[in-house]
Amino acid sequence: MYKVIDNLFISDVGSAQNELLLTEVNSIKAVLSIMSFNLPLKLDHIVYKHIELMDMESEDILSHFEESFTYINSFRTKTPPESVLIHCQAGRSRSATICAAYLMKSSNMTSSEAIEVLDKAVPKGVYPNEGFLEQLKMYQEMGNKIDRDSQILKQFLLKKFAANMDNLAKLDDNVWAPDPLYDPNKGTTMSSSSLTSAVDCGDRTKSVNNDVYKCKKCRRDLFFSSSLLFHNKDVGATGDVFKRRKGTNTTCKNQSQGTICSSYFVEPVKWMEILILGVLDGKLCCPKCRSKLGNFNWSGAQCSCGVWVCPSFQLHKNAIDFSPQT
Ligand SMILES: [Zn+2]
Ligand SMILES: [Zn+2]
């Protein structure tokens, strides 16, 4: 069990159940376990919290940063402060990632600075897996908070949904971007699309103007501007969200303004549900007039500008009418 900063400790699963280390040596008052299973051995006078997570690159640890921060801080900011232990199996990857995110937010550090602090605290060093390191960088890009309007977050969540494609039929309604035709907030300024509401703790204060994009043929409302996904190569810390194919040099700054992109890429909109669930790829047709608007592919597709977008919900600009609200 190692002290990271005052009242914050990190350890493996063995030390997390060692009564001597917990009580007499370090006076731990709260334990945060980040493991696939819960601790079998618990002490009466210690508060426990368990986050079920495996040490895999594909695991979404980012969604747990804010709840972990709140939990840890609730003890560390008491008068007098109480000590918290964060642990996982080996005390190297999952717990180190949660610990790093805490340091980033509480001390306004970059992800590398936070890892450095941990490396100094833990004699053999910490080794968050590559996927967790990327998520720490994403957190940093969002300003050490969960920004619900962030393209980085939207793309991360979408990729996560794509990875769980087999389960998509079971997913809650709020993973879909709203259908403007049925949205009560249509025409008003509202918080950005509901895809990001899958993250519990977020910044709800930001809002965007929601222009509506329509089917050119029948004028059916198709999606809000907040559902657009941009694929500027600089967007996102995760290089694999938007891979660029070898040999292509062109890229677009912003697809809503860019001329090289012949398509809009969007979050899955509610009306697409019947077309895209349980199917790997196919056409996207207008829900009213059935004319072809574009394509979708859960494994991704290449934009005309050369950027690889994954997963891709692509609507051809020449099939869509854009009428900004005044
Ligand atoms: Zn493009
Ligand atoms: Zn139509």
Image: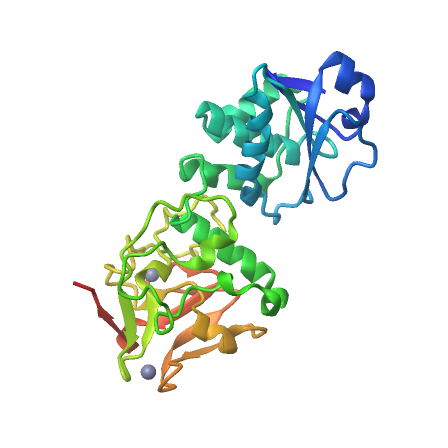
Q: Could you tell me if residue 93 is visible in this image?
A: no
The percent coordinates of residue 18 (x first, y second) are 81, 23
- Residue under the image location 60 percent in, 70 percent down: 169
Looking at this view, name the residue that lies furthest to the left. Answer: 326
Q: Quadrant of residue 131?
A: top right
Left or right, 198 with respect to 292, comes to right
Does residue 7 appear in this view?
Answer: yes
Residue at 52%, 41% in the rendered image: 135
* Residue 121 location, quadrant: top right
**Rendering quadrant holding ligand 2:** bottom left
27 vs 295: above or below? above
The image quarter in which residue 164 lies: bottom right
Quadrant including the C terminus:
bottom left
Measured as percent of width and height from the top left, residue 318 is found at: 27, 75
Residue 174, percent from left and from top: 49, 61
Residue at x-position 47% and y-position 29%:
105
21 relative to 199 in the view: left or right:
right
Q: Quadrant of the N terminus?
A: top right
Residue toward you, 64 or 290? 64
Q: Residue at x 49, y 58 (%)?
A: 158
Judge by depth and name the residue closer to the eye, 236 or 177: 177
* Residue 97 percent coordinates (x, y): 59, 34
> Which residue is more in the foreground, 143 or 129?
143
Left-right relation of 52 to 120: right
Q: Foreground: 76 or 100?
A: 76
Is 52 above or below relative to 230? above
